[in-house]
Amino acid sequence: MDYTAKMKYGTEEVEIEVKGAKTVEVLNPDSMPEIEDVAEAFRKCVEEEAIGSEPLRKRITAGDQVTIVVSDITRSWMHQGDIMTLLGHYLHDDIGVAFENIVVLIALGTHRKSTEQEKEIIAGSYMYENVQVLDHDCDGDNVYVGTTARGTDVSVNPLVIDRKVVVVGGTVHHMMAGFGGGRKNILPGVASRQTIRQNHERALDPRIAHSDPRVGCSLLENNPINEDMNEAAAFVDVAFSINIVVSTSGRYSGLFGGDMYEAWKESCEFQKKCYEKWIDYEADIVIVSSGGAPKDMNLYQGCKGMLNGMRAMKEGGQMFWLAKCPEGCGAPDYTAWLQPLKEGRLDSALRADFTIGGFIFYLTVENLKKGECRVLTTIDKDTTQPMGMTAYTDVSELMKGVDFENKTVYIIPYGGSVVPMVEGVD
């Protein structure tokens, strides 16, 4: 079977010829509905369609002190500023909450501080101009609120204590927590650095030098990170949550408002229908693109395409991965782990000084052991080779000598979003 794959690479498109394969299957996300009237969809999600909760106007009164916790600029793909504008008008105009009683708290986790321009994008101009918009500081004066059953000491920003809290976030697959959104606005969003570290360290298997197999995309039940996050977030009295699902075109597809846990769970189920692709077998060859810009701006972000693609490749198979990475590896914390890797002490080093960037690096290296990986990228071979992949800058060189004869092939044009699911695997 012959096929010409057209794949995104940065802002470009490249073609890859497949000749003589036994089978070729393209794994694309399913189409999602797109919301035409966002204002009306927002009204419904905070009123008659609230999930597991009374409507927002019954959860908050005019005299309340309100903190809106919203995801940071790294989640700007969900255009949260537009929803924040609708929420601001609703709280102020419909419920009667005074501007001076509203604070927008950006859920930075351990991320860098926001610029003033980013604050306006995150909160929307209406909120930015009328209420305080503040960054969470994971190293600031956070307040202890309890300890989870797994032993995580939970300290959070004082602005989510003794105030009415509304969380606004986007729901996507997450390689550690199963799904982003919901409770992640509390932990890691507005938690202390120590709380975040204690939670995230659970990504490593406590018995062997490996990631914990219970941790990964779409995994919620018995996932120690997710369950710890749920318990930690319950220490905060969240009055209402708004969970956003965005279609592949970037437009709003679903708004799920209500109880922090119940509304978020429905948003996860909705998101799964588009981006999870059930397959009958793992293939000999996987050709995957991270999805082009901005999904492949750097290796730290773009590696999600490879990690998802590996789910569709059999042990000992071949992967051809496209991730341009014009910004290089991205987070300095990602490449800092190259040296421990070269010295054969990556696992022990990460356990001694766990970081999120370090774990993403660890997961990248771990997955690359499954088979051969060639990557089309601007990152140099000295960086990629120790990790377990060979870098190319020319697509013809990338595909040189590949034998497709009688091989099963998956093509994944949007590897940063599509999550292959194999029956009995995970």
Image: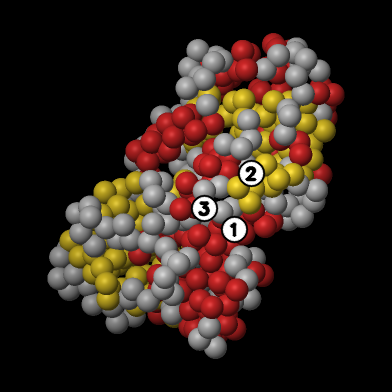
**Residue behind mark 3:** 150
**390 or 52, which lies in front?**
52
Query: x and y percent of residue 234 in the render?
Result: 57, 36
Colour style of the rendered protein structure: secondary structure
Q: Residue at point 26% right, 49% down?
A: 278
Q: Residue at x 76, y 47 (%)?
A: 142
Height in image: 387 above or below 172? below
Would you say 150 lies left or right of 93 here? Answer: left
In front of the other: label 1 or label 2?
A: 2
Disc 1 to disc 3: CB gap under 8 Å = no
Q: Residue at x 58, y 77 (%)?
A: 349
- N-term-proximal mark, 1 vs 3: 3
- Quickly name the residue at label 2: 146
Tell me if residue 166 comes above or below residue 412 in the rendering. above
Question: Looking at the image, which is closer to me, 227 or 298?
Answer: 227
Dot 3: element: loop
